[in-house]
Image (tube, helix red, strand yellow):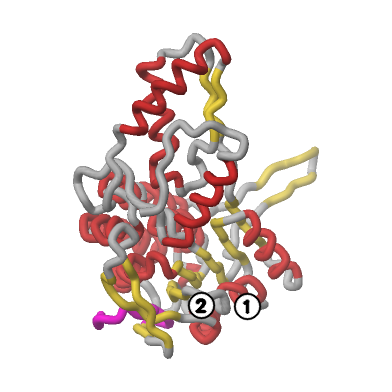
Amino acid sequence: MTDIARHWIDGQWQASERVAESTNPATGTVIGRFADGGATEARAAIAAARRAFETTTWSRDRALRHRVLNALADRLAARADELATLLSSEGGKTLVECGLEIASTGPMLRHTAAQALTETGISAEVSPGVFFSTLNEPMGVAAIIVPWNAPVALLIRSLGPALAAGNTVVVKMPGQTALTGALVAEIIAEVADLPRGVVNIFTETGNSGAPLLVSSPDVNVVSYTGSVAVGRAVAEGGAGTLTRLNLELGGKAPMIVFDDTDLDATIPVLVAGVTAFAGQFCMAGSRILVHRAIADRVRDAVRAALESVVVGPGDQATSQMGPLIDKAAVRRVDGLVEQALAYAKPIVRGGPV
């Protein structure tokens, strides 16, 4: 690797005309530079994945896929501390949260490695003398559009099953965690038995490459994790080719507190639900619904607990909650709080730093 993190396409490191900087969201300090891709890189990655699917034995060699997935699990485990440290610095999450994210990848990969050996399909006699059978086959080229809030775990969650099934893959990593994505690409490139072009990874800060992954007739299935608004755009973009989609979109996660609860046990859970990943994930506690009889007690306890949370850089060992991902996110969240103040009484009011 050079001092500019590059894309991994068709078994080679590739640069781009544009170069962008990655910063620590807690301090604004530049921590590295990366090639900022787009349509050109997307087209090259799609072509490489299609070529690998059609010309290699990857889709037919279960033993190879089993071996590669287990090897990737080994490589990620060997560099887990390095990955967690970089992700914490670049993505803002605490070291503990990043460590848990990286640790989750091993079991996911080993599970899918085992699945690669069990794709036998099923058969049954549905009525006397009438039989049906199924045969598992790879779709072809799978595109994975990865979010920045858990870029390693959410990449592996889709990559593992796609590879186990015999697909080749194009991955679009987010610009906010570009260096982390490049390190994952480097780890994948270290897996010796992985055929050239089976996994292709590029990063972009804009939005010219991702739409091509969705609309290309050479892409057979798309996995997208992100907002509802962009999920709708993905569905519209894939409609022309009837591309199969797997969409995990934003949601709401109310936390409900009944009047017979053990508050000593409940309050830490409520606070964790709000502060984990700085609230930047789909299962964050969006609101707390409390029985009227204990509402005041819960409000006071939550206030005290939130005021004691140590907010700081994610890569600082004492931090219990890291920063939001960037200034745009800070402005958006602060705007939502200001809107809420028109009809609600604040418990704890933070703000931009």
Q: Is residue 286 left or right of residue 326?
A: right
Which residue lies at the image location 27% right of the left edge and 67% below the top edge? 29
Coordinates of residue 256 in the picture (x, y in percent): 54, 24
Q: Is residue 116 left or right of residue 233?
A: left
Q: Quadrant of the N terminus?
A: bottom left
Q: Amino acid at mark 1?
A: Asp
Q: Is residue 212 magenta?
A: no
The dot on residue 218 is 1
Coordinates of residue 286 in the picture (x, y in percent): 53, 38
* Residue 193 in sight: no
Which residue lies at the image location 33% right of the left edge and 49% below the top edge? 322
Coordinates of residue 140 in the picture (x, y in percent): 58, 70
In the picture of the structure, the residue carrying the numbered disc 2 is 49
Q: Do the residues under discs 2 and 1 have CB atoms within 8 angstroms?
A: yes
Q: Quadrant of the C terminus?
A: bottom left
Q: Residues within 10 Å of mark 2 (few under 14, many from 20)?
A: many
Dot 2 or dot 1: first in sequence order is 2
